[in-house]
Image (cartoon, coloured by chain):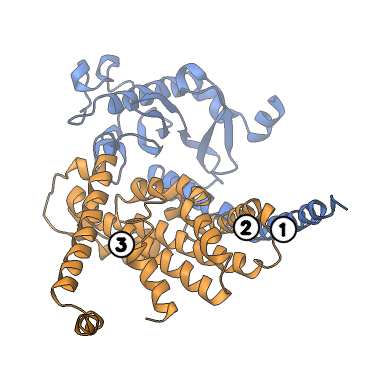
Amino acid sequence: MNPFQNIVRDGLWTNNVGLVQLLGLCPLLAVTATFINGLGLGLATLITLVASNVTVSMIRKLVRPEVRIPLFVLVIASIVTIIELSMSAWFYELYKVLGIFIPLIVTNCSIIGRAEAFASKNTVGRSFLDGFSMGLGFLLVLVALGTLREIIGQGTLFSQAHLMFGEAARSMTIHFVDSYNGFLLAVLPPGAFIGLGLLIAMKNLVDRRRETRAKLIPAPADQAAQATN
Amino acid sequence: MLYRPVFISAIFLLMFAVIGSGLVAYTFDSTEERIAENQRRALLNSLNELVPSDRYDNNIFSDILMVSEPELLGTDEPVPVYRARKGGWPVAAVLSPVAPDGYNGNIRLLVAVNLDGTLAGVRVVQHRETPGLGDGIEARRSDWILGFDGKSLSNTATKEWQVKRDGGGFDQFTGATITPRAVVKTVHKALVYFRTHRQSMFEQSPEETAADK
């Protein structure tokens, strides 16, 4: 596998921000009551990650190690503020729904984590790919959790899509059951914890299945090794 | 010589602080107008839901009175009263009271009162009530808030201005009594405020209130 594939795989699965690193849980759990909220915050985080990774990677040779952390924070804070302002200019309704969690992206550990662990040591191209994969991995978890909680909690999907896609999307909402009473637990914070727990369990289950299968069918390299023995 | 690296680092940090602030300032500058316009439109939308735009012909945004009445409007801060007039005649006033006793902090309301003292409508502007329980006060979640339309101090007795559990005339929600109780109480107080201040409310022009300060 070439290094680029590795980076993508790491971000989306092996080292997923939400499911494996368990970073940025505060916004993850707080805003994922609906699909659209999850998508909105996911996109904002994705853009921040890509922009901060690219910037940090570009200046990585100029920065003295003693001041790198304050510098990264400065870069990330500037980027997030710019995104916040742009969102309230172009997606005002969505911005109002996501509220405090947009400025709080600054404190999302995964962003400074990637800046420190990856972007400060790698080329701009790789850092871009890493930021994009990590961000996409986080976005997918947000969207999965949002979908799960919205369907169980409200019996709908894509409700309030107009916040993101304009008035035409108002009719996108899918109602699964007529006059659904709602399942409050899924909407409230405990539902977010349970939902995330289920997602992590599912990921681990898939990983284990894969492992057992890999054991049952030994790789060709192993056979070669056994033959020489 | 020892201080040299420190000095260089400091300069470097400063440089980036300047570049960062510069970019933020530029974005702020180029989005400022749009954001203000968004806020204005959002407010106008909620005002027009209460007082339809064909009922007034004045500029409802600049015809504002800032009033402060902690007892009846629920907050120490001055809150705006939007005044709707047609042909110079008062039509309705939209008060912005705060219910300080929600289940989870303040509930900000818009209460539109017609000149004759009947409610043109009530909307929740901001709240942090429990999703799925207390958020039934939002117009997009349930019709409960529309129940205020047409009510007034004269057609609804004082003891009716309570939720049913307290012996009044307004429904509570299953599992949430505190939230509707707070809203009903605040709307009632706003009506009392309107009754006592109706005369002066429409007489004062915005300039006068500015001069008062």
Gap in angstroms between the C-alphas marked 3 and 2: 37 Å
Q: Which mark is residue A138?
A: none
The residue positioned 62% from the left and 58% from the top of the image is A75
Upstream in sequence: badge 3 or badge 2: 2
Tell which subunit mark 3 falls on.
A
Gap in angstroms between the C-alphas marked 2 and 1: 8 Å
Q: Amino acid at mark 3?
A: Arg
Which residue lies most toward the front here? Answer: A229
Q: Which mark is residue A75?
A: 2
Gap in angstroms between the C-alphas marked 1 and 3: 43 Å
Q: Which residue is mark 1?
A: B16
Q: Which residue is mark 3?
A: A170
- Horizontal and vertical percent position of residue B105: 40, 28
Which residue lies most toward the left here? Answer: A178
- Horizontal and vertical percent position of residue B180: 28, 28
Using the rendered image, report if marks 2 and 1 lie on a common chain.
Answer: no
Q: Amino acid at mark 1?
A: Phe
**Residue A89: which quarter of the image?**
bottom right
Graded by Cα atoms within 10 Å as few (under 14), some (14 to 19) or many (20 or more), the crowding at tag 1 reads some
Q: Is residue A70 visible?
A: yes
Using the rendered image, report if marks 3 and 2 lie on a common chain.
Answer: yes
From the image, state the color of chain A.
orange
Mark 3 or mark 2, which is nearer to you?
Answer: 2
Relative to A141, residue B80 above or below? above
- Describe residue B172's horizontal placement relative to residue A134 as left or right: left
Q: Amino acid at mark 2?
A: Val
Secondary structure state at the residue bearing disc 3 = helix
Secondary structure state at the residue bearing disc 2 = helix
Front residue of this view, candidates B85 and B10: B10
Front residue of this view, candidates B135 and B151: B135
The residue positioned 57% from the left and 69% from the top of the image is A54
Rendered blue, the chain in question is B
